Amino acid sequence: MKQYNNADGLAFTATSSESADAFSNFTSAYMGFRRDTGAMLKALMDKDPDMPMARCAKGYLAKLIGSSNHSARARVISDDMGELLSRTGANEREYAHASALAYWCAGDLDKATRVWERILLDYPLDGLALRLAHFTHFYSGDPRTMRDSMASIIPLWSPDHRDYGFLLGMYAFGLEESGEYQMAEKYGRMAVERNPADAWSVHSVAHVLEMTERTDEGIQWVMGLENSWSSVNNFRFHLYWHRCLYHLERGEFTTVLKLYDEQIVSDIESDFYLDICNASSLLWRLEMFGIDIGRRWESLLDVARRHVNDTDLIFVSLHYLMALIAGGDREAADRMISNIKEWSTLDGTQAQICAESGLTLAHGLRLARAGRFAEAVTTMEPVRYKLDRIGGSRAQRDVFHMILLDAAKSSSDTLHARALFAERLGHKAHSSWSWKGYGEVLTTLGQNEQAQIARAKAAELITRF
């Protein structure tokens, strides 16, 4: 095998220059969430089975699925990389990627991310390293590093590069998660203007509109671009989830349930981890809004049961657990909590997060669902300022804050509940759910005049739509 450079000057150990070009196309497809990403990699491996970066990328994709079965496959690939690298005369960058995969398989996301960031210092046009670092910063609850990682790279790319728009969208998301909404919106809209099918960038702006409570604009933004972003892989369902959040605050529950049935869980059997996150958090939210969701939890149970023993991403595992708890499979839920407890004693980045907050949240979810509200509050509240660490976005993690408030409202400590709801209204002044809950708490306290104002505010927020 020889070294062939792609158009970005990155060297690949391969049998032909066509393989180097094909890998570039695969990277662009991965960054764009294209449905044919896996097929592109398979075609490349069929043609060039010993190409080190293709083999490493196969391991990466397995890890990105976020389940124990696929992680085991990634580990097999990683274990064989040493011999392959030596036999094919791989280059330094390829050795570094193999090292990152090995760290990831060993559960050390921090070291894997540091390797990708090191690669980017030497090879800033390595789009695969860039996107993977963005992913792991996100699921390590590190928004400022996610933001700054992109800021350090963007000036080194030409605006004429075909993937440049993806960088703008990733930077927009890091800005949004760091609370810099104005700049985030600017970069996100720039990215979408370049490529309306860039689902991650559409989603970055959707987050800004959610966090700045611009509900009408959010619906218009997501729906207006649907013909473009709906062509991508299962990530498209996450954009429908964002649309559902807007409709929830408008009190349009029939629309939410329709989107849930027709989109959110339409491919739930494919077992893509983000689908269960969308579904579980949306159903639990609907119930907190007082909506009868029928038997919809039951359709999530089979998928959730497959992941009782996962030890990949605690954010995702908590959503599988939500489905097991709410769906009534107590035995599976207990086994999963036991697994999370054991996970929290291991080495590794996500294990540490389990110990810090993940296990506590797992217990809190079970207590809240069992109606042991005071215990749920006592359990969950000490970690509410540590929630960033479980990963996911601000919008995604909000369901755990809502569960805490919902439990507080149903507990006997009404004064505490009043404080929590008042605090929430400080940054969600246009949330009908928050005003309604605040009104209920004030009524319990006998503060009828203030309760009437809160209820009127909740009704006004819904009826204005």
Image: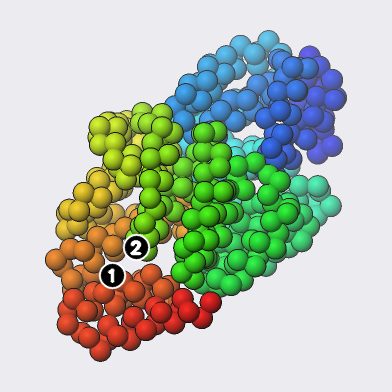
Say if 348 sits above or below 447 in the image. Answer: above
The secondary structure type at the circle numbered 2 is loop
Which amino acid is tagged 1?
Leu
Q: Which sits in the foreground, 208 or 292? A: 292
Q: Looking at the rendered structure, which numbered label has been put on residue 420?
A: 1
In the rendered image, the vertical position of residue 323 relative to residue 462, given as above or below: above
- Give me the residue at 39% from left, 82% from top: 457
Residue 339 vertical position relative to residue 324 in the rendered view, above or below: above
Number of callouts = 2
Give the image location of residue 61, x and y in percent: 60, 30
**Gap between marks 2 and 1 measured at Cα:** 19 Å
The x and y percentages for residue 142 are: 48, 51
State the image coordinates of residue 245 (x, y, percent, origin top left). 50, 61
In the image, 459: left or right of 16? left
Residue 132 figure quarter: top right
Task: Say whether marks 2 and 1 touch (CB < 8 Å).
Answer: no
Residue 464 appears in the figure: yes
Dot 1 alpha-carbon crowd within 10 angstroms: few under 14, some 14 to 19, many 20 or more = some
Q: Which mark is residue 290?
A: 2
